[in-house]
Image (cartoon, rainbow, N blue to C red):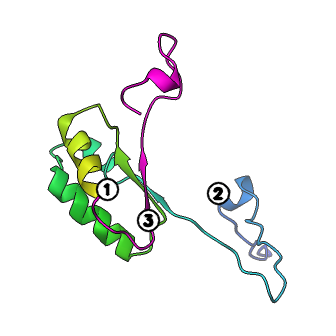
Amino acid sequence: MARKPPQSRTSRASREHPPVLQPQLSADQTATLEIYDTTLRDGAQAEDVSFSAEDKIRIAQKLDELGVHFIEGGWPGANPKDIEFFRMIKTIPLKHANVIAFGSTRKASNTVRKDPNL
């Protein structure tokens, strides 16, 4: 009985997802990648994690040192620690990062201009 030659194998994932296309850049162009970090808000949602305002400041400074472009600081008005963080971070010079606030995009009962948390 003759044996069949081995078949090439591809993973199911590689068959289901097309290959990533690489941008075609000329020699004088560079690709830009900006990082938006949510550690200070999303990271604090994990079980047994609670950042103080001072913790958030230290983390934001380290993220800035790493070259992160955008740091989501939390939701001002949602809790006293976030309010304190946003008050404190205004006094900290950051080299790379912009500090961003998380918030609702629309509330039926309130306009953006009248939202005290923004």
105 over 72 or under it: above or below: above
Q: Amino acid at mark 2?
A: Ala
Q: Amino acid at mark 1?
A: Lys
- Quadrant of res 54: bottom left
Q: Nearer the viewer, residue 117 or 103?
A: 117
Which of the labelled discs sits on residue 46, or is there none? none
- Identify the element where label 2 is drawn: helix
Cα distance in 3D space between marks 3 and 1: 12 Å
- Identify the element where label 1 is drawn: loop
Q: Amino acid at mark 3?
A: Ala
Residue tagged 2: 13
- Asked whether, in this view, residue 85 is left or right of residue 100, the answer is left
Q: Nearer the viewer, mark 1 or mark 2?
A: 1
Which stretch is magenta?
Answer: 90-118
Mark found first going from the N terminus, 1 or 2:
2
Residue tagged 1: 90
Residue tagged 3: 97
The structure residue drawn at horizontal position 31% and vertical position 62%, both measured from the top left corner, is 60
Q: Residue furthest top?
A: 109
Cα distance in 3D space between marks 2 and 3: 35 Å
The structure residue drawn at horizontal position 73% and vertical position 58%, both measured from the top left corner, is 15
Are the residues at dot 3 and dot 1 in contact (C-beta closer than 8 Å)?
no
